[in-house]
Amino acid sequence: MTTTTNDVTSRVLTAPDSLVGASLAGWLAAGGGTGLRRALDDRAGIIGLIERAGLRGLGGAGFPTHRKWAAVAAEPGPEKVVICNGNEDEPGTFKDRVLLGRTPHQVIEGALIAALAVGARRVVMYVNPHLTEAIEAVGEAVRQWRAHALLAALETALGGPVLLELRPSSGRYIGGEETAVVASVEGGFPFPRRKPPYPAQSGVHGLPTLINNAETLANVPHILRHGAAWFRALGRGEAAGTKLFSLSGDVQRPGLYELPMGATLAELIFDCGGGMLMGREFKAVFTGGPSNTLLSRDDLDVALDFESVRARGSRLGTGAMIVVSEGTSIPRKVTEFVEFFAEGSCGQCPPCKTGTYQLATLLRRIDTGHATRADLEQVRQLCGLLPGSGRCGLIDGAITVVASSLERFGAEYERMLIGG
């Protein structure tokens, strides 16, 4: 299900039929390609325009897009790489598969504009192979772009041939972490690496590498076409643009929704999602996927933008919102998520691999009513010992959701102990 609310002009989901699927001709007929043409006319102004628009990374961290681009552009030499990260594999997140499967050309055009801005002649569409519709659509779209005059114009501007390619990821959750993306594109196992150096300085085979999420790149052609002021005006308050929200869990109408950045959590759940299933009361929401702090009933008024959600002690993340109603067990949901993290750990950092496994074992014991107070205390101790012990954020994400649930819903854990 895809929809928009609040009279926001949708650019990605409720697109006319001519934009849906893998038709480059349809995309261009509907105004696609305008952004790339304008970028070719004013290459030096691209990064400044992205800065004025206030576009931020929409794959999780919310890092200012122009700063990433400027870092890669500042690196010397013509051999650079742009990667569109479409590895999406986190529970509750399903925005990128829709973007890549339904409107791949706007994402590819955004990646080509990024390549022009930073001076890269290799563009990699890195897509989770489990997203079969997205893989097929992007593969066909790449073939059409390779034969089009716009790519030839880009090659002229960059002074050499541009390699535009589809590269299936490993299909593993950890494969979406940016240094793991680099390792995978190099042909190796997606082991995360310590930073620095960051990919902007040393990425694929040591080359400066720009990595952006598919949703981030999908916005770029529209910013080039309509301008920075237009994009900023789509958001509310100080927030710029719109955001895709993957709404799931105990709501009447789960689906993918595009809202102004800064719309409230209540609007998403009750206006878009139709409220709670079976008339139950709202209890909590896992924000930005299962690796962030939970929000509860007192947070329904929060504006869904990076700063406002952070001020409530959580993160906007990917925009996934997994809603939980009264009557649903928080310890059970947390157990399921930690088991996912334990399965997804790559294993190169023993504290992460063994720590997530031990956490999952203890939580399952609590969830099934077989745990003692000593087990719960061990969970608390692990939450204090494990953060920062891995090369990437997987272990930190697992600890964050456990610690948050213990802080806000600790009584539920207590009641599930033997004799509780």
Image (cartoon, helix red, strand yellow):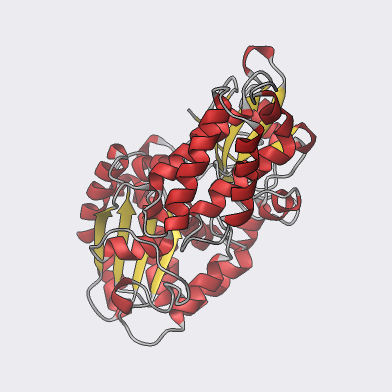
Nearer the observer, 111 or 145: 111
Q: Give coordinates of residue 95: x percent, y percent.
A: 46, 41
- Residue 236 located left or right of residue 65: right
Q: Give coordinates of residue 57: x percent, y percent.
A: 54, 59
Q: Give coordinates of residue 270: x percent, y percent.
A: 68, 26
- Residue 36 located left or right of residue 49: left
Q: Is residue 133 above or below residue 63?
A: above
Residue at 65% x, 61% y: name it.
229
Residue 305 visible in rendering: yes
Q: Give coordinates of residue 182: x percent, y percent.
A: 34, 65
Asked where in the image residue 143 lies, by quadrant, the reply is bottom left
Q: Is residue 170 above or below residue 116?
A: above
Location of the C terminus (image quadrant):
top right
Residue 3 visible in rendering: no
Task: Give the residue furthest to the bottom.
Answer: 76
Q: Is residue 369 above or below residue 176?
A: above
Residue at 37% x, 50% y: name it.
87
Asked where in the image residue 284 lies, by quadrant, the reply is top right
Nearer the observer, 20 or 253: 253
Nearer the observer, 188 or 87: 188
- Circle count: 0
